[in-house]
Image (cartoon, rainbow, N blue to C red):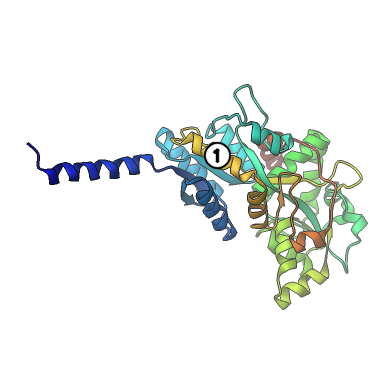
Amino acid sequence: MFSRQFVAGMLLAGTALTSVAQEKVLNLYSARHYQTDEALYADFTKTTGIKINRIDGDDAGILARLKSEGASSPADVILLVDAARLGRAQSDGLFQPIKSTLLESRIPASLHSKEGNDGTQWFGFSTRARVIIYNKAAIKAEDVDTYESLGDPKNKGKLCTRSGAHPYNVSLFGALLEHLGAAKTEELLKGMVANQARQPVGGDTDQIKAVGSGECGVAISNSYYVARLLRSTKPEDVALMEKVGIVWPNQKTFGTHVNIAGAGVAKHAPHKAEAVKFLEYLAGDDAQRYFADGNNEWPAVKSVKTTNPALEKMGSFKSEVINVGAVGANQQKVLQMLDRVGYK
């Protein structure tokens, strides 16, 4: 016969094991690193009881890790920045399609992967624009009010950009491929190479500073870099933003290019139900504000409005109407063009 103490101990152990087994968790692989996201994750856990285990890294590192882990990967949700990177993950087979009436109704069709019969592979949850920055003392806004103008001979020796092969530019050029066609897009890239004031170097903020210093006359940047500088109280940043102007490109034609930060359910997700619940949570009003404001972006859900003062200062604009899934799918064609025209 077992002692009463032994039986009681076994019952307590069984209760503990059951508690551990029933604990709901979500393994998130994230390329976002913003402090405001901490409140987002904490609110999700408070609301749902699902604990988030997070792996942070840059987009390339996240994708490499997922490929090396293969079918044994513990990842449930993959959160990436930029349509080109989401498209790469999709082409590498790292997502699984899901069906969610809530997500399909809340997230515009233009901001998620092209839907197949099995469902949608990833959704965009915030948006950012790729704008043109110019030196107000040296350049007229009307001379740089389209992406095509960046390749115009009148701007020879004035253009600065980061690497042409950076995902932000690959996505922009992938969108232009949809709008202009292959021949015109490649001709534009060739013109941009001819117009460079220097070899591509640095990030978007470096391009803005180069325009402010007069090293360049014009550059392109994601809108959130501009918003960060507009919100800064540092004297050097205030002085910089007084020297540069901001253009929403192609307002008279197809509109300004818009990119996304987005997420999908990992192919081998061990907690698929929790993963879908997390994506649906990100589409909620409060989460949309947390998610977008964390990086000075706009919510993907059109009914949700931001109160970001820098974005309000930048004003409203006409955005392109194009499926970002198509933009991501164009990246290989764009990279081949960049090689042909010598865009470093």
User: In this picture, is 182 found above or below 222?
Assistant: above
In the displayed structure, does residue 298 sit left or right of residue 56?
A: right
The answer to whether one can see residue 342 in this image is: no
Total tally of numbered discs in the picture: 1
Residue found at x 51% / y 45%: 48
Q: Residue furthest bottom?
A: 235
Residue found at x 47% / y 50%: 54
Q: Residue furthest top?
A: 117
- Callout 1 crowding tier (Cα within 10 Å): few <14, some 14–19, many ≥20: some
Q: Which residue is mark 1?
A: 277
User: In this picture, is 150 found above or below 2?
Assistant: below
Q: Quadrant of the N terminus?
A: top left
Rendered location of residue 271, percent (x, y): 46, 36
Rendered location of residue 230, percent (x, y): 75, 67
Which one is in front, 143 or 73? 73
Occupied quadrant, residue 133:
bottom right
In the displayed structure, does residue 137 sit left or right of residue 2?
A: right
In the displayed structure, does residue 218 sit left or right of residue 87?
A: right
Rendered location of residue 149, percent (x, y): 86, 50
User: In this picture, is 252 found above or below 242?
Assistant: above
Which one is in front, 104 or 76? 104
The answer to whether one can see residue 3 in this image is: yes
Q: Residue furthest left?
A: 1
Rendered location of residue 17, percent (x, y): 29, 42
Label 1 sits on a secondary structure element that is helix
Inspect the image, locate mark 1, and give the three-letter code of the amino acid beneath it: Lys
